[in-house]
Image: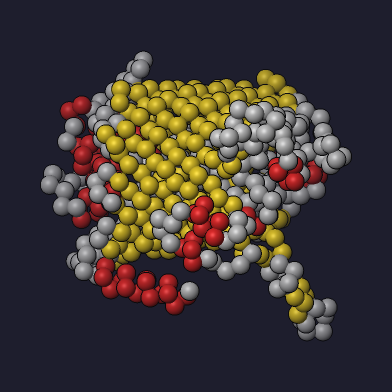
Amino acid sequence: MKRYFLYVLAVTVIISQQLLSQSVYLHPSHEAYDFLKRMEGKQILQRYRDVVLPLTREDIAKDLIKIEEHRDQLTQVERDELDFLKEEFYVELKNLKYSKVLPDERWHLYRYRSDSTAAFNVDLIGGYSYEKLPFGETYHIRSNGVMVQGYAGSWMGAYVYFLDHQDGGSFIPYFEQKFGTSDYFKNTLSPQQGQLLTRIIAQNVEYDLVDVQANFDVSFLTLSLEKMPNVWGEGYDGNLILSTKPPSYPQIKLRAKLGKDVDFTYLHAWLSSDIIDSVNSYYYPYGLSEPIYRTVYKQKYLASQMIEMSLWNGVDVAIGESEVYGGRNPELIYLIPFMFFKAAEHYNTDEDNSQMFGSIDLNVIKNYEFYSTLYVDEFSTEEFYRTDRQRNQIGITVGTRAYDLIYPNSDIIVEYTRTNPWIYNHKYPDATYQNHGYDLGDWIGQNADLFFVQGNYRPLRNLKLSVQFESLRKGGKEATHYQYELPTPEFLYGPEIKKQSYGVAAQFEPLRDLFADFHLLISRYTQGPPETASDGSSIFQYPRISADYAGKIDFFLALRYNFQ
């Protein structure tokens, strides 16, 4: 298998040296995506497909060129944003032989340009945030790191993003004293990306984050070796298929442009099961002291693919599937792009975990976007109408976004997501839809729903003002064997968490990539008492962080530079 992969990679490199294309994927949190989404909603940018993120910087530069052709239809704020992004994508626009006058390239800490096609940038990363939580504790984060990205020759792009974090405040000792652990990432219900703690010192915890990509272009194909987050599926307050909730994971990714209206993405990822392999773990003598135990974990993988199509102007659809499997080496059958994974699972005697999903994005009415994503873990059409036989383990997101409805440079988002009991789960723990114990999909997890409303207004290019409302309901989770028994428990069964908040937020960018973020929310939280299943076992729910509260203030203030 290793020789086969090295052979494919060698052929890719040899062929790609004759081609003129370079790819570096832009992190899915970058502001450019929101601008492109707005241009699509206003029907200025047509056949824009973004259900699979990230996109390459070159593809985004091509979209900026298309938008420039309709410059007269933009507001002044939008024109300022377009010019600002042209400075950001200067190298890509220059490589594309952009015919109009280019603005000056943006500033970098260090910038290298050769006479050929080699170019790379080095920039620092930093940030500090402070939050006063509704139940009275404080929480702050200090971050610093470095980012390098660039191109080599005419066929390779690379990106490295390293960030070191130290979290502190009264919340950390409060949480440790209350629950006996400092790992609040895994034990709190939050959209914040999951992390792996590396050190605990007094009232602080430390961890690091690294994303890396090496991309090789061959004609209409881009082959990537990377450790990067994936965002698959429509949604502004979460993503059902793949999201930034889990720690990013190493993967091989293949992206193919099958014509101007069709894109195909395949990836095979190496996940972390956190399950000890007792057969391969062992004791090893260490000097004169007691033998030390070498822990080996069971292997776990994700194979996933998605095809995106623009059927007509304003109508984009996508359909895909994935497979999680583990406990052995990578399977060749899951390394084949375009393979029907459900059939492959049957070939492997149905021991793995398959999912199917699809999305639709409609921009057929100017200034209005309508979108939906469906995630299917398990579904039976024969038993759909039988309440005693239903095992419909699905998730769905529906939403709309309206642009310039009240004022120019404004938008309103209304979104609802529901996840039925047991999605993302499986009877075999090395086949769950998780990485390091975090769901790969929506941060709300299984047996939950989320209603989200947000209004945004940009009086200036670098100033965004928002009002928002969010309501979350989260049910419990029984022992896994109940997943395969009928009837399926009712939606939101178990001790229920309810969280609501409303308030204002702002984002200001006084200098390029230097952001000041703020929110002031009025919050409410309730959690039902513990419950037990019919066999007497406890129904799992996130730990009760505090006593119920209402009308409490959540205050957040942050300053960040180049922080994704």
Specify how the rendered protein is coloured. Answer: secondary structure
Q: Looking at the image, which residue sits at the far right?
A: 536
**Which residue is situated farthest in the top direction here?**
406
Image x and y of residue 513, in percent: 39, 44
Q: Residue at x 48, y 63 (%)?
A: 333
Q: Position of residue 524 (x, y in %)?
A: 67, 23
Foreground: 279 or 140? Answer: 279
Q: Is residue 90 visible?
A: no
Q: Is residue 438 visible?
A: yes
Q: Determine whether 183 is above or below 463 in the image.
A: below
For the point 25% across and 49% down, which residue is it?
259
Horizontal side of 199 relative to 86 (left or right) equals right
Tell me what residue is drawn at x 30 percent, y 46 percent: 262
> Residue 149, relative to residue 171: is it above or below?
below
Q: Quadrant of residue 465?
A: top left
Query: Observer-nearest residue: 413 or 119?
Result: 413
* Residue 213 image-quadrant placement: bottom left
Left or right for 122, reference 354 = left
Residue 36 position, x and y percent, is 32, 37
* Residue found at x 76% / y 26%: 548
Residue 136, position as x, y percentages in the image: 71, 31
Q: Which residue is nearer to you in this view: 349 or 397?
A: 349
317 displayed left or right of 518: left
